[in-house]
Image: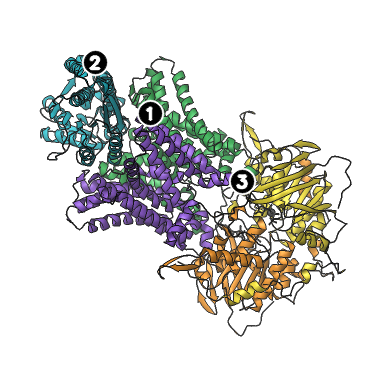
Chain colours: A orange, B yellow, C cyan, D green, E purple
Amino acid sequence: MTDAPPATPPLVALKDIHKTFGAVSALRGVSIDVQPGETFALLGDNAAGKSTLMKVLTGVYQPDRGSIELDGKRTEFPTPSASRDQGVEMVYQDFALADNLDVRTNVFLGREPQKNILGPFLRIIDRKKMEAETKRVLERLDIPINPRLKVKRLSGGQRQAVAIGRALAFDARLIIMDEPTANLSVAKVDKLIEVTQRLKDLGIAVIIITHRLDEAFAVADRFAVMRQGQVVGRFHVGDVTEAQVAHLISHGTLDDYVDYGDGIPAERRKIGSTSSMDVVDAMATRGNTTDGSDS
Amino acid sequence: MTDAPPATPPLVALKDIHKTFGAVSALRGVSIDVQPGETFALLGDNAAGKSTLMKVLTGVYQPDRGSIELDGKRTEFPTPSASRDQGVEMVYQDFALADNLDVRTNVFLGREPQKNILGPFLRIIDRKKMEAETKRVLERLDIPINPRLKVKRLSGGQRQAVAIGRALAFDARLIIMDEPTANLSVAKVDKLIEVTQRLKDLGIAVIIITHRLDEAFAVADRFAVMRQGQVVGRFHVGDVTEAQVAHLISHGTLDDYVDYGDGIPAERRKIGSTSSMDVVDAMATRGNTTDGSDS
Amino acid sequence: AGGSNADGSTAGTSGAASKTYNIGVVVLDLQDPDLAHMTDAMKKTADEKGVKLNITDSKKDVGSELNQVEDLLTRQVDAVIMQPLDGEASQNAAKRVIAANIPLFILSTEFAEGSNVGYKSYIGVDDTVAGEMQAEYLNKLLPNGGNIVFAAGIYGASWTDRRKSGFDKTINKNFKIVAEFQAKGSRDEAKRNMEDTLQRFPSGKIDAVVANNDEMAIGAASAISDAGRTAEFKAVVGVDGTDPALKDIKAGTMTATVRQDSAGQGVKAVEVVTDFLKGGNVENRYTLPFTLITKDNLSDFLK
Amino acid sequence: MSLMTQNIKALLGPADLKQGSAATKVKRFVGDYGILIFFALIVIFLAVAAPNFLTLNNLVNVVRQSSIIGLIALGMTFIMITAGIDLSVGSVVGLAGMTFALLAPASGGAFWLPLIVGLGVGLLVGFLSAAMVVWGGILPFLATLATMAIARTAALVITDGQVVSGLSGPAEWLGSGFIGPIPVPVIIFLLAALLCEFVLSRTKFGSHVYAVGGNEESAKKVGISTGRVLFMVYLIGGVTAALGGLVLTARLDGAAPVAGTGYELQVIAAVVIGGTSLFGGVGTIRGTVIGVLLLGVVMNGMNLMGVSSYYQQGVQGIILVLAVLLNRWKSD
Amino acid sequence: MSLMTQNIKALLGPADLKQGSAATKVKRFVGDYGILIFFALIVIFLAVAAPNFLTLNNLVNVVRQSSIIGLIALGMTFIMITAGIDLSVGSVVGLAGMTFALLAPASGGAFWLPLIVGLGVGLLVGFLSAAMVVWGGILPFLATLATMAIARTAALVITDGQVVSGLSGPAEWLGSGFIGPIPVPVIIFLLAALLCEFVLSRTKFGSHVYAVGGNEESAKKVGISTGRVLFMVYLIGGVTAALGGLVLTARLDGAAPVAGTGYELQVIAAVVIGGTSLFGGVGTIRGTVIGVLLLGVVMNGMNLMGVSSYYQQGVQGIILVLAVLLNRWKSD
Ligand SMILES: Nc1ncnc2c1ncn2[C@@H]1O[C@H](COP(=O)(O)OP(=O)(O)OP(=O)(O)O)[C@@H](O)[C@H]1O
Ligand SMILES: Nc1ncnc2c1ncn2[C@@H]1O[C@H](COP(=O)(O)OP(=O)(O)OP(=O)(O)O)[C@@H](O)[C@H]1O
Ligand SMILES: [Mg+2]
Ligand SMILES: [Mg+2]
């Protein structure tokens, strides 16, 4: 559970981050670091604080306490633009798309390529280039979409692809993907895994948040497991099994983990037992206590 | 690829549904039927038309052509309320939550339980009951959330849980779930699979849309595969392998399917090949042609 | 009025009978009851005279006034009767008419002193006089002066400015304006402001209300009588002489108003313009008198 | 009775998670009660600075003056929570008041008839707006801009621009009467406010109003008949505006066809100060009541202090900003 | 030059997928060009029904009349696309025009100075609004309601409610002059419209305006400085309103402190008719120009046909509804 201190400073390090929303403590002293070119998986149960932590890193939220270091130097990201300027791209869980705009405009939002007209002082948006680049990025993700379609017209997977395409379209040092495969079909997931592996070859660091452990194990060098706003485990990918990680995600500790040797997590064993069936039973017996008619 | 005609009329049958949005033909003659109490998986690539088909069934969209039958009788769902009144509940891919309202209100939206005050003519919303029921449903899904929290404050998985909870909180004959596990963590997915199995025992039919074939194979009795607005295959769950289905989803036909005998779909074999790596290569060599600076 | 009718009929026989004259009219606010009254009278006279009126409304906006004038010019009317919104700001619109070589007549509101707009004649009253008459009425009624609440119309609008300045010039030094509010000519706003003002000044601290028009006087009077303080006020005086105001004078909640014969002005204007178009001579000025109405002469005006 | 206590509890603040640090608590308190605190501060200031402000007489006076804008604001709150707007309220005041004034003297003592017809006029205009919004799919801003124009035209044409004066006694009572020490307009306003608060916060329909404003598409998907909800809110808006018009007419003992001109802006301002969002989904009747009273108190205070009319608009603007700055905390 | 042709192409319709059935094509065509078609129908109707409508003189007249509302509407379009609104434009017209009129005679021939100061006043008010919206987090409706009150108060206080008259020759030229056969206000309006169209549809800033209006949070997340964008649009709104005020003053050869009262509603109506949404994210300058001309032509046509002013408002309301019904197709 301990890492050897790395020789070079980490690309990015979050130190003792705290963040509270009203009565909810979303982050309670979280530290992680990502090495240059590394693929890092951030795992954890729902509401563990994963998205919140990443939004601290991209300047969407300001931490209540704790610091951010970039290349070993302390820095601050007061706005998303500050973070993006430092080469941090993020695929947000809610996609962060502008529904009223078309695909190409969304991909290049905030980074529109420009061309000169009447000399270098009058510059206009280069829509042709935006269109061509958008097409290219999406086709290579194997999800071709007409770049002129309004985003609100797209299917769930297509929207996700646009969000991913946006992060890939620029020269980043670190790409953060928050559940990027949630709405993608099998073949698309594989393609994204390929792309992620290739990013590593290019020396671009990746943080991926996912609930699919197979995906995490397929791409990550290291990972951290969060639970209730804290990190409960840090591993190199070879050091643990999927089953152990699954146990850790749900229970926050490996102390009570029982290894059946077949790699099936303890949770899955429970399927078919009656532990949590009562909700449905209740549905069957509730009858008409709930008034279902419209006003 | 053919089903034997069932003895009882199907619970619901969609016949030759067409739906066009502007220039996009989302559905081009789709027919499916679901038997009472059956769990039916709707599979298909991104943008295949799955969500659109289900929205036709819940009255969100009106089909351009084709018909809907309920218990063998032709019917129409001009509005979602008409469909919901017939016992059709749906978990929408975008959750269909009202961000400004709290969890309990969202769960009971449109079906608020009421209690009498000053006789039966003056009825007010029974918030206590809403709260208690909400708590119960969510706890049994193993995702406890404070019922008074505004939905906009929730994490991705919590939002999804609220959407699922809403569909489960009422007496339905058919529950449609559009990628309900997209944002759920491992243990929660298992719990939902359990719940789905239990629904079957209670005789409640389920249509589940998912990109996770293991989930589909774990719960479904039958499934259909869609591609580009058409059904390209209908199967009982024992008749095909996951690998074959994955191939069908991506290619629309099994004619060119090669069985390696190990159940790994042909797609996955390609991982590591260079087929679609150029997007990332392009990223590496693009240099500064794209202006990344802010205005 | 009978005389001019006879004039009209003789002109009608002099050969130009085939031509129906089109007269453009720009009124400053047709939603004002008093002006609505005036235009009704104008229409009736026009029917009698066999001329056609095109009445437009500048909606209390100088920009819109200019637009209306331009549109009238496009319609190639034979003459324009204009009730300027403002003695200064409306001059450009008036000059537009002159430049188009169309005879211009000014109704009810005069241009600022010293301006030279080449109109054919002015038909109307001098609003300054209305203010003066209000002041004279008070001077006579309360020689020892008293405290006045002043309900102003719309600051910057010429009817307000002129009535107010006439009053200020004439009122004697014993009087003091202890409160002034802008009620925009509306009964509603005047009542609200007066209610507050009554709270501010307990019994005995105010003696009179002077309003720039009757609607505001009525609103103030209504606030006073609601508060049961009618007896304290020796004078509540407005301008216009509208029917509701006369009723209030009868009821004793108002004491006086200065009647400007709006309908009479409108009728006169149509008569003058018709005369002119038919080749008659017109004077440069037709000033109609104001009349002070109090309980004493009320019966002459009540219908 | 228990309803009353519950409403009072609701007035004291929304039930929410009450844990958290002391600082959080203070912040949440100011957020929840910001506008109330601000209102209290203004009242305290005026009590000191404005002579006669804190007399029973004047306080009754302020509430009576506010009751007309207040009545209109009640319906506007419903409409704005659905992310709509109603620009026609001012002209409904004019038209309904006009109808009332025309019928009242004729009907002698039975002033119920003109009252019902007046309210019916409001319903009719509300129906027109609703039809355009729901069936025509026209944006509320434009639909009600159109009904505003149409209602005003109707009022002008009916009376040819003339003022209608002289109501009968009972009709006048509506504007100037008292029940005990409380003026009738105030009683009408308070009863209407209580009813609206009840409907909005306690009933199914109220809950649907918020849902439609929060996310109309989601509301539709869960089976709420959004069209019906929208229809209802514009009808409510029409009726409350008409009621405001009747009270105004009764108060002034007459109706001008232009009565109510520009009220829409005052009403919207009061509603927004009370915490209702122009983008829908958020707002309460109790907030609106405070917003209305706040504007009323400020106007009254300035008059009592003898602030020149020139400056009054400017002062009002500044107060507005301050009020809203406090409300802003809430949305965090 | 190539810019011009591109703009003309843009005016002819948005580039979009052009496949689909014939019926779809017709529907899309009406959707894209609905307001244009409607405008054309009205013009044809008036050409037949209204005497003198189709004279060169009158057409020039209509455009000149529309140019002031038009100028203000340009800036309002930017603001409304960001989901904002600016209620202060009317009082900016008054205040800027007043400043211009006060300085113009004194500066003799050099009318650049008063011009610049006048525009500066607009900038200042825009800055105030922007500061409240961006730094204060106040809703645009309320922030600009406040600046509206403040600017109007300033105009009244500066001149003590008096009208300022008598501009110098060159200043007057701004309102009444011609360049060739075209009135100066028209030229100013057209140039400003072209510039705004260019900025909104071709530049990075323009693209960000749409993004902020479509989804402010997303825009922030991709690193757009939404505060800067909002600041800019309110400054633009202030300048165009001030420009409108200068032209109005020059046209009238004088300025009243109450000039421009109520313009905000006309301007917003024109912008919305032109297809801009009150909820932001949608709108074009070319649409606004058509909306402005449509309103102008309707008013002019009714005057030429001698429609009674009582009915004009009503007719306008109905036209509005019809125009918007056509626009609605678009949003499907
Ligand atoms: N803006 C916010 N306001 C209030 N609470 C918030 C906010 N954002 C997150 N939270 C709370 O913080 C906690 C962590 O949320 P977060 O979105 O980081 O979870 P997560 O690990 O990404 O979960 P998931 O896998 O479900 O997306 C949750 O309890 C959530 O309700
Ligand atoms: N409202 C709409 N307007 C225009 N096009 C639409 C609309 N809804 C869906 N489409 C188009 O219809 C096609 C099918 O979309 P749909 O959402 O049904 O796909 P899906 O099978 O659910 O995909 P995913 O798995 O990515 O969610 C897509 O090409 C999409 O762009
Ligand atoms: Mg998350
Ligand atoms: Mg889908």
**Chain bearing mark 2:** C
**In the rendered view, does E257 fall on the left or right side of D275?**
left
Label 2 to label 1, Cα distance in Å? 27 Å
Dot 1 crowding, Cα within 10 Å, few <14, some 14–19, many 20+: many
Q: Which residue is at the front of the view, A168 or B152?
A: A168
Residue that carries the numbered disc 1 in the rendered image: D248
Viewer can see residue A232: no
Residue E297 circle label: none
Dot 2 crowding, Cα within 10 Å, few <14, some 14–19, many 20+: few
**Chain bearing mark 1:** D
Residue that carries the numbered disc 2 in the rendered image: C302
Amino acid type shown at disc 2: Leu
Amino acid type shown at disc 3: Thr
Residue at point 33% right, 54% down? E125
- In the image, is residue E162 above or below residue E221? above
Instruction: Classify the position of the C terminus of chain B by image quarter.
Output: bottom left
Residue that carries the numbered disc 3 in the rendered image: E24
